Image (cartoon, coloured by chain):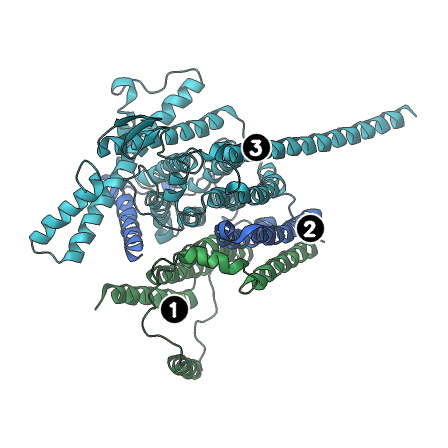
Chain colours: A cyan, B blue, C green
Amino acid sequence: MTFWNDPINFLSGWLSGILTAWGLPATLAMVLTIFIGIVLLVMFAMTLDIFLVWVERKVVARFQDRIGPNRIGPFGLVQPFADIIKLVIKEDITPDGADKVVFNLAPVMAAMAVILLWAILPISSKIYGVDLNVALLYLVAAGALGTMAIIMAGWASNNKYALLGMYRMVANVIAYEIPMVVILLIPTILADSMSVKSITEAQASTWYVFLSPLGLLIFMISAIAELGRSPFDLNEAESEIVAGFHIEYSGMKFGWFYASELLHAFTFGGFASVLFFGGWQVPFLLADGFHFGSLVVTLPGIVVVLVQALAFLLKALFGYWVIMWVKYSMPRIRIDQMLAFNWKFLTPLSLVLLSVTALLGQLQTVLLPWAFTLVMFVSNLLIIWITIEILRAYARRQRKQEERITAAAAQGAHQ
Amino acid sequence: MQSEWLYIGLFLIVGILIPVAPLVIAALISPHKPNPIKQSTYECGIETVGDSWVQFKAQYYILALVFLVFDVETVFLFPWALSLNKMGVFAVLEGILFIGILVAGLVYAWRKGMLEWA
Amino acid sequence: MPAEQIVFLLCAALILVSAVMVVTVRNLVHAALWLVAALFGVAVLYAVLSANFLAVVQIVVYIGAIAILFLFAVMLTRRDLVVRTPGMRGSWWIAAVLALLVLGGLVFLIVNQPGVNRTALAIPAGVDTLHALGNALVSSGQYLLPFEVSSILLLAALVGAVYLAVSRKS
């Protein structure tokens, strides 16, 4: 293992070697090395978060046919830093009767829940936190911690609008967790593993978006609902209940809620890319270079690792862009429509998709890879088509009923 | 085995320190001039009317119950999903039976109007 | 003292302190939040024992569903969320003696069980516990029947919830 093959492990080994040479016991050296590595990773995530604030403001501006921040720094790139400085020097107002401890703990928990997700995100084949063998359930667990943060924030604010916003947000988040977890089962079945590293490695031949496009669709919808972004953002409807569960937060505490929402959106884009778009897999790129059939272009290991990391970041940014695109193009839907959509449509649909995928997954060992891909893709399209037909029949029935009612009312008016 | 959770434990510690750091800086350098108007509860700029505790719809609790049942179901489905490679079609059918019973429960709840307004 | 033991002691302290706070704190929402801390401590214990699946399931189900249910129930019922009755009744020392007797009896029984290991068993190399768990759940000789019966149990819970909801509406 040299620097050019396996940079992270080499560096960590070198660092703990130095620390042991200074007289520290081996375990403490290892812990310190890991700690430094984690701090670097989280710093990277935070820097990305700052960059995402700029991306968000520029993209929303372009969607709304304006320019966005362009005064501070070239293209407004320094704008997020100015925002952070502003937030830090603002006065921190705690409302009357708020529960001080819980009030202060909530933004920390919200940020912590999102930062914890970066422990399992595979950025490249050699750059990742841990290879946890229950990574997909860990994703759900981090979401559960985030939900706790929302409850704490909404309750501790001593404000009825915060409370209302919190109830709606929690009802939304827990409802949309079900289709999301059911869809997480699909890559588990296809890759026979719950570890995101294994799922990424299993997509070396085909990306799962071709095996389960409906799964990707339901995952994106659930992810957008989990984040509480438009069109599911009745919980913090700016024109209605101002800011939902974080009305009473000012200064950097609000900053953490906002920043963690953006980072969470990016992380979901990252997970969508890992689960469905092959994560850091680049077509034709293997561990030692590009393989185009018989032509092999060897590259040093570190270049391969960086190319894979870049591929992952681009795919995650694409996922994030789709989430923003949906946010800035669609109107908000009502809370009862949101929940009905989940319980009456997405949950049964995702369970049906899971059953069909489990049944057809048995053919994975029997068919050739391209035949299996075709069978899965066609089955997904079939499910979509049947669902649309059912919805159309239902809508037709509804329309006939309404026509009958209006016809009866018109007849009654005539007589 | 152990080192994975050690890593995540350290991640947890870092995840708590990193949000706390700017908050501590903010507490040190931001002005602190409380007055009753600033600290009153926000209600779109008008004086607050009534209690800050509102009776929320019981429907939220019922939906949380339904969520709990389905959450436990999906947690059971994870080990099932991992066994499919080895155990063949029979395991798939057993899982589909499991899912089917719970979908029947969902349909029952739907017909009884439990999934109506949120 | 091996690191594992230090982590276990810290964890046990967290769980015990949180459990005591749950029953003594006056504010009900605070009590529910201390319960969340206790459940989190149990999840850490599972992680220390290398039971990865159980650790994350503990957080997903207990903290992500049951604790939320508790919090909703508390917020639905109590108006002021502060318990006004006195914490301890006059005869608390009888209860303390009884509790200590029960604790002593349980510890005696558990420690003297023939099959109880004082050290954690090493997982045999090459065995993937997750897949083994999955296979056990669907093998007819092992846990298939409990697996299917648990779905009936969940169905019963759902039907019970429907009954409660419908009877409260009418």
Circle 1 crowding by C-alpha within 10 Å: few under 14, some 14–19, many from 20: some
Circle 3/circle 2 CB separation < 8 Å: no
- Residue C76 falls in image quadrant: bottom right
Q: Nearer the viewer, mark 3 or mark 2?
A: 2
Q: Residue at x 18, y 45 (%)?
A: A12
Q: CA distance from mark 2 to mark 1?
A: 41 Å
**Labelled disc at residue A33:** none
Measuring from the top left, give residue A302's x and y in whole percent. Answer: 22, 33
Q: Is residue C126 rendered to the left or right of residue B114?
A: left
Residue that carries the numbered disc 1 in the rendered image: C20
- Residue C102 falls in image quadrant: bottom left
Total residue callouts = 3
Q: CA distance from mark 3 to mark 2?
A: 26 Å
Measuring from the top left, give residue A10's x and y in whole percent. Answer: 18, 43
Which type of secondary structure does the marked residue at label 1 adopt?
Answer: helix
Provide the chain ID for the residue under circle 1.
Answer: C
**Do the residues at pointers 3 and 1 share their chain?**
no
Residue that carries the numbered disc 2 in the rendered image: B108
Name the residue type under label 2. Answer: Tyr
Q: Residue at x 75, y 32 (%)?
A: A398
Q: Nearer the viewer, residue A97 or A105?
A: A105
Q: Is residue A240 above or below residue C87?
A: above
Looking at this view, name the residue that lies furthest to the left. A22
Q: CA distance from mark 3 to mark 1?
A: 44 Å
Q: Quadrant of the N terminus of chain A?
A: top left
Q: Quadrant of the C terminus of chain A?
A: top right
Provide the chain ID for the residue under circle 3.
Answer: A
Name the residue type under label 3. Answer: Ile
Measuring from the top left, give residue A171's x and y in whole percent. Answer: 53, 45
